[in-house]
Amino acid sequence: MKDLLAPIESLAGGHKIAVTADDFAAHSLELVSQFSGADFIAGLDVSEAFTLIGQIDSHISSLMALRARAVVVAVGDKPERARTLSRGTDVALEDVRSSELGAYLRISPLAARNMAEVCRDLVRWLPTTIRHLEVGNIDYGKARIVAEGAHQLYTNLCLIEEDALELDDPKVFEYMERFEQIVCMLIYRRTNSEVRVAVRRAIAQLTPLAEETRHEVGKRERGVEFVDHGDGMTLMQALMTNLDAAKVKNVLEFCAKNDESLTGTHINRMSDALVGIVLGESEITAERRHSAAQVNVVVSLETLLGLSDAPADVIGADFALTANQVRELAGNSHLRRMVVDPSTGALLELGRRSYEPSRQMKDFVKLRDRKCRAPGCVRNAMRCDVDHIQAWDDGGETNVNNLASLCRRHHVLKTIGTWQYELKPNGDTVWTLPDGQVITDYANGWSPEPFADHTVDLSADLEPCPF
Ligand SMILES: [Zn+2]
């Protein structure tokens, strides 16, 4: 297996590496041809195949970092034509050289412009992110989520300044540095959806005013549309706030699962539940729907008291609320005290209500975990089972240190014994898969500071880019 890397290391170590684009192409071809034989692949065992997939992905990431830099050379670090600002959205009028790139790669001008934009933003503003990409810590998809977030941050800054800032304005760089600091602590070995949450909460933290302004403007656009689907069906689309959408989704999911009069697939039942509720024909009482709508927002006491402007997280959703938005919300909501460790953001204690202890314990575990604790799984913990990590029959206790949220699929895999895991004191779950792979699902937290353990020491970790 190790041999796969040898040609690359010798290339990088000898420094007699590709000096022209043609050399690069020849080297790449040589490398791939050495290992592309069906015999080589057929000779791998399962564990080696996993390692190979990981190595290949890591090299693809390195190559994508290289590509991003090459794209910037090809299209220039700024669009050639001026931009205008229209209603807070920054529009590149025309980007001549990205159109050339599109023609060269046979992709649409829009796709080429997006590619150029992401690559420029990465190279200009996000040195740590592109370094993570270079060493294979993240894939291009995650780098793109960060770059698009950076662009949103830039748009927000222009909104606050009420004037278009230059892309290389020192003030923009200052914000980008803080943005990257917050986000990069939360991108290593995370899912796309976790990276998206980290990006949104960083934007809400750095430019709350712009986020609130955009939200107020966006709110004016709310509405419902009915589009003829052409087959006797109609598509209904509604634009509403993220928070309302999260509540509506919770209710529809709940009804789809619990209303026994509904038939069909889960989404069929959600659609029928919506019709039933609107027409007053739902079998689920208004009271049960009301409690199903509950959305859990995690906010620090400091933010509620106005001592801090740290944003709040909405569990199981892809968006964050600014400090002002959550304070306003708190004014007319039922609040439940959740004590979190200020240094790690880990949930320590849940305020008592009139629930049975077991129910309270389940709530604690779900709110602590936020999602299924299997690596890569993003199922909302509120819709997960609570699993005894060490089975009750094997002497496992019913306390929160022995309980974790697992979606049904991962619960089954664990119960039948093919996947196993343990919960570490820092909240990480460490999984052992059937072929011996050990994979960590890092603890969820909402504080931007606490992830020192999980951040990568780039200075130590960096190997020279292989090419
Ligand atoms: Zn899962």
Image (tube, helix red, strand yellow):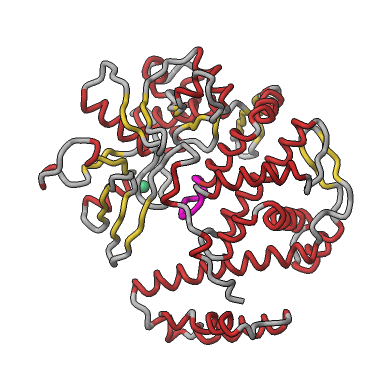
Residue drawn where x is 72% and y is 55% of the image? 124
Report the side of 448 relative to 439 (left or right).
Answer: right
Q: Position of residue 295 (x, y in %)?
A: 45, 26
Question: Where's the C terminus, which quadrant?
Answer: bottom right
Magenta span has 188?
Answer: yes
- Residue placed most toward the observer, 158 or 235: 158
Quick check: 208 above or below 401? above
User: Is residue 62 placed above or below 209 in the rendered structure?
Assistant: below
Residue found farthest to the right: 81
Q: Nearer the viewer, residue 238 or 168?
A: 168
**Left or right side of 223 for 192:** left
Majority secondary structure in the magenta region: loop
- Look at the image and tell me in which quarter the N terminus lies: bottom left
**Residue at point 52%, 87% (across, down):** 34
Total label count? Answer: 0
Q: Any magenta on residue 303?
A: no
How far across and how far down the image is residue 93, in percent?
86, 47
Q: Quadrant of residue 345?
A: top left
Q: Quadrant of residue 54?
A: bottom left
Q: Position of residue 441 (x, y in %)?
A: 37, 51
**What is the magenta range?**
186-194
Left or right side of 324 for 70: right
**Residue at point 42%, 23% (across, down):** 294
Q: x, y (%) of residue 149?
A: 64, 44
Residue 383 in view, yes or no: no
* Residue 347 appears in the rendering: yes
